[in-house]
Amino acid sequence: MSDPYHGLPVITSVGDYRQLVQANPSHALVDVAALIPGIVLDIRYATNENIFGAAVYPAARALLRQPVAEALAAVQDSLAERGLGLCLYDAYRPYSVTVRMYEQVQDENFAAPPWRGSRHNRGCSVDVGLIELSTNELVPLPTDFDDLTPAAHSRYGQLPAHVMLNRSVLLATMRQHGFINYPGEWWHYDHQQWAEFDLLDLPFDAVQR
């Protein structure tokens, strides 16, 4: 039988996860909406509006490792000074969903391959856009989430000036709080501590806190 984890060390046992958290509480996955009450969730993989055309998450939830969630809360506070806030499209993603995604896309530029895994699987990556706090309306950015076109690239220049400005505001604010953008996707950011955390393939309800 083939190895479903491609030789990667992936935590699949809830018991192992809980032991890890007991030893180091910063490894806990926390509910982003509970920590950041004003954040807007648009969890596309809990809907049919995604590259699969069907929901692959059982509920629209966003989980992140404790320090990553706290850093995102700091981003939200900084954006609020500009009258802006975050729209969160995805956070923790079980490894098995990453495998399905790569099988669907077959392009390492837009989907992490199973033999490497995703930083989403570590609870250390976020996919985000911007909203106007006064209206809760989306701020114009280059493309929709998960748009697999050249315009999704963070340095794509054939855009209206106000769209590029919005992208720059998001990039600068995320960077200020320890997030690094993946250049192929303007919406994707990895927290700078991602390497400290294990890959996980655990269902959302199993790690609820």
Image: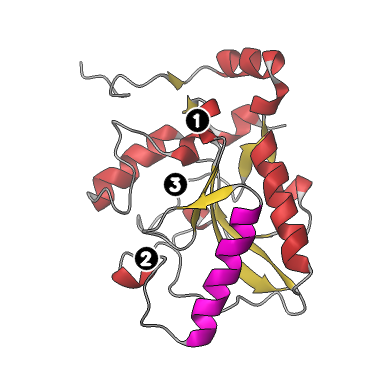
Q: Where is residue 62? Give x, y as percent.
A: 62, 46
Position of 86 with respect to 37 (left or right) is left
Task: Compute the Cα span from label 3 to label 1.
Answer: 26 Å
What's the magenta region? 161-176
| Dominant SS type (magenta) | helix
* Quadrant for the C terminus in the image: top right
Question: How many residues crowd mark 2 within 10 Å: few (<14), some (14–19), many (20+)?
Answer: some
Q: Which is more toward the observer, 172 or 75? A: 172
Quickly name the residue at label 3. Answer: 56
Q: Earlier in the sequence, mark 1 or mark 2?
A: 2
Q: Residue 104 lies in magenta, yes or no? A: no
On the image, the x and y values in percent for residue 128 come to: 56, 59
Q: Residue at x 40, y 19 (%)?
A: 9
* Structural distance between the alpha carbons of marks 2 and 3: 25 Å
Quadrant where the N terminus sits is top left
Q: Is residue 154 left or right of residue 72?
A: left
Q: Badge 1: how crowded within 10 Å, few (<14), some, or many (20+)?
A: few
SS label for mark 2: loop
Q: Which mark is residue 44?
A: none
Three-letter code for the amino acid on which mark 2 is drawn: His
For image coordinates 43% across by 53% down, the residue present is: 182
Residue 65 or residue 209, whichever sits in front: 65
Badge 1 amino acid: Ala
- Mark toward the start of the polypeptide (2 vs 3): 3
Q: Quadrant of residue 82?
A: bottom right
Residue carrying label 2 = 153
The image shows residue 18, relative to residue 190, as above or below, that is above
Q: Earlier in the sequence, mark 3 or mark 1?
A: 3
Q: Amino acid at mark 3?
A: Val
